[in-house]
Each structure stands twice: as C-alpha cells, then as structure tokens.
Image: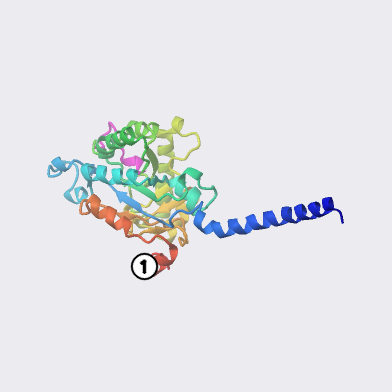
Amino acid sequence: MTEDNNDQVTNSSRSKSFPISVFFLLVMMFPFLNLGYNPPTIPILGFHGIVDAKRVNTKSKFRQSSQLDMDYTKQEMEKLLEYFIKHDYWFLTTQDLYDYFLTKSKEIPYAYRNKQTIMLTFDDGYKTVYTNLLPILSKLENKYGKKIKVVLFISPGTLANDDGIPATHLRCQELRDGWKKGFFDIQSHGDKHKNLTEISEQQIVSELLLARIKLRKCLDDLDPEQKVASHLAYPYGAANKTVAKYVAKYYLSGYLYNDKLLNYTCLKDNYKIPRLMVNSTKSSQELIAMIQDFPTDTQESFKKGICK
C-alpha cells in the first residue's frame, strides 16, 4: 500500500470517529446544559382589591369589612413585584400557562427557559386594581424596563356603569386601558359572580356564556385572536362535576381558589388549576419566604403532598 493510500485510510478513520466522539461528549454535557428546564411548581397567587395602607382603616360605604380583609396593600404589593423583577421571574398569562406548560402545544421561547415562573391573579374586578395597582405596574416598567402581566378574573355583570352598580368596581373602559398598555390579561369569573354549584344547569350555561360574550364585546377591537375570556376562575372557588362539564364546553381551563400550589407535571385536570389565597395577613416578605420554600422538582412535590 502506498503512503497516499495510508493517509486516506487514516483520514477516513478519523472522519468516522470524530462525529461519534462529539456525540458522546454532547450526551455527557447535556445534563449540565439543561437548556429547557423550568421548575415544575408554579405559584399562582390569588388577590382581590389593592388598597392604600395609609387609608386602610377608612371603611368603604359600599364594601363590607369581610371584603376589605381580603385586600392587599399597594405598599406590600410594590415590594413583592420588585422582588420578582429583580429575580427575573416570568410573569405568566393564562394562555402562557395553557400553551407552554399544561398542553405543551408550544415550545417555551429560548429567552424564558430556565426562568422561575409566577402568575398573579386578581378576582372580582375591584376599581383599586386600576387606581392602585396599574400605577405600580407602570412605575416598575419605567424603572426596570420590564412589563408585568397580571390576570384579572372579571364578572362583567358587576362592572361599574351608569345604571347603579357602584364605582367600587372597574368599568369596561378601564379594562381596555390596562389591556392596551399590555398589563392586563382579562379572563372570566362568571357573569354575575354566582356560585355555580348552587344554580340550575341552565343558569350555569347563562353565567358562562354571558361572561364570555360581554367581555369579548368590551375588548372586541383590541383582541382579534379572542384570547379574552378563554379561561375561567370559579366564583367563590366552587366547582363540581356538573359545573366542570359545562366550563369545559366554553373555556380552555378552570381555576380554583383552594390555597394549593400547582405542579404542572402532575396536574391531571386542566379545570382544577390550584391557586394560593393571598390577603393582608401575609406581608411581602412572608410571601417571598413561602415561595422560596416551594419544592423545585416533582420528586420533592410528591414528598410534600403537592403531587399524589
């Protein structure tokens, strides 16, 4: 065999072994690269009104003290949001959760891989979400250059209007304003906030359909993809098999209010998404400590009873 032939054999051998060696190297490195990992536990925090701590003792002539107890102060809210921004949390919308984690119908964008996730929800459509929360969202966006998305679960039959519904609740125009600014994800809470487990099946359908129709009408020209009112939070957190059956006909997912943590890897029903209850009894520091203590993998979730 000539020297040239020997060189050809050697080069051929090298060309075959090179891809194999690269393959094994990548296999060994893959666990450390962890390119697509997001923690399986997602805290979904459930708030209501946002009040000024300096005026919290002033009783509203429209709202009962039991309702005021469910509020959270804007001062503590700003501290909480600032923590999430500084630690680079991904603020999920309901459609984000559905597409990227529950159904996995979309691949998580590269920029969001490996990020901790949070969802902030606000029930009942109190006006203080507009007067006290929205300015904080704008302020933090200007300060850090990051937009915070929050989910509003709205009962359109309780929105403020000129027909006597008190101004303690949002108006359609205020929903539109928050949506246009890119802060609000607006979803359904039933039409008139009725306990769906205590009404007839015909009334359930009416509550579900009217809520969707009215909310989409309010934001019609701003929402060509009809993402508004695609998901629902059960009023009072109350649901049963009959309610879930009808909700599944008109909505993509359903949210409870049961003070439990979501681990999307072991969630068996997209109409039983758990949320954590938040009120004025928990400071921002206590909430942060609680979130930091949440399990970061599914095995630990089983140990703590989150997955069963």
Whether residue 168 is visible, yes or no, is: yes
Q: Give the percent coordinates (x, y) of residue 259.
A: 32, 58
Which residue is more in the foreground, 40 or 169?
Answer: 40
Please name the residue that numbered disc 1 is placed on. Answer: 304
Q: Can you give x and y, in whole percent of width and height, for residue 217 in the image?
A: 43, 34
Quadrant the C terminus occupies: bottom left
Which three-letter amino acid code belongs to the residue tagged 1?
Lys
The residue lying at 22 percent from left, 54 percent from top is: 282
> What residue occupies the far right of the structure in this picture?
1
Q: Which secondary structure is most common in the magenta stretch? A: loop
Question: Quick check: 245 left or right of 158?
Answer: right
Is residue 154 found inside the magenta-colored segment of the image?
Answer: yes
In the rendered structure, which segment of residues is drawn in magenta?
A: 152-166
Of residue 106 and residue 207, the one placed in the foreground of this image is 106
Spot occupied by residue 59 in the image (x, y as percentages of width and height): 13, 43
The reply, left or right, for residue 164 in relation to residue 37 is: left
Q: How crowded is mark 1: few (under 14 residues within 10 Å), some or many (20 or more)?
A: few
Number of numbered labels in the structure image: 1
